[in-house]
Image: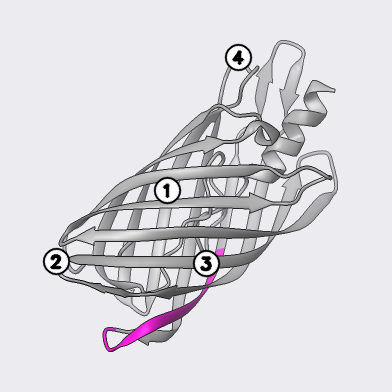
Amino acid sequence: MKRIMLIIAVLGTVSAAGPAAAQWQGMPVWNNPKGGTGFTINGDVGFPNSDALSGTAYGARATLGFSALSLTAGLSSWKPDGAGEGSTTWGGTAQFRMIGGSLIPVSLNLQAGWGTASAIESGSTTMPKIANYLIGAGVSVSVPTPGLSIEPYLSVSNRWHDVEGASTESNVGWVLGANVGFGMFGVHLAYDSESASGSKPGVFGIGAHYAFKAPVGM
């Protein structure tokens, strides 16, 4: 039973967050529909709910933005409650802005992602290796605020979870989040929810980012 719950949790917390990327274990699917240019580093912390076996995840990402196109690579380390060791996920994301920009307050983007999470073997409990894929879209609104860049967004994606030794599962998930910039420095937060095997795994994530050139938000 414990193994089944671990697999369900993995299916629920897989996300790529972020975009042409996969899900990073224990993290929401991060997004930045507005996009931007420059190189940005991100530090993230994720808090899965009880349906996702709780625990805490830590991650780091690097994003290279070419205005409408953004490419992200990163990793996360997540240790679910009840496991003696954690799982590490390597993944990447690609995002392409279809509508929006500096003169248009509403942005719409497409995102795709992939990630591979290592197996957990702790005593009699095993969480198999899993590969995660997602394709989706996000919409955001730039809120005019003096001295700040505020971008609340909503993303919806279809997610495929390929568990080693089991069949691939397909679920729909959504993310409600926001990117806030203070010039080159900023913060981001998001809540991710996905229906999986009759449960409702959810992940709340928060983090900070620093843009070395023009801010790219996430």
Mark toward the start of the polypeptide (2 vs 3): 2
Q: For the C terminus, which image quadrant? A: bottom left
Quick one: SS at disc 4?
A: loop
Whether residue 42 is situated above or below residue 3 in the rendered picture: below
Q: CA distance from mark 3 to mark 1?
A: 22 Å
Q: CA distance from mark 1 to mark 2?
A: 29 Å
Quick one: SS at disc 3?
A: strand
User: Mark 2 = which residue?
Assistant: 147
User: Mark 1 = which residue?
Assistant: 74
Closest to the camera, between mark 1 and mark 4, is 4
Q: CA distance from mark 1 to mark 4?
A: 24 Å
User: Mark 4 = which residue?
Assistant: 84
Closest to the camera, between mark 1 and mark 2, is 2
Q: Residues within 10 Å of mark 2 (few under 14, many from 20)?
A: few
- Mainly helix, strand or loop, the magenta region? strand
Is residue 47 visible in the rendered structure shown here?
yes
Closest to the camera, between mark 4 and mark 3, is 3
Q: Which mark is residue 154?
A: 3
* Amino acid bearing label 3: Leu
Mark 4 in CB contact with mark 3 (< 8 angstroms): no
Residue at x 47% of width, y 56% of height: 30
Mark toward the start of the polypeptide (1 vs 2): 1
Percent position of residue 176, x then y: 52, 59
Magenta residue span: 102-112
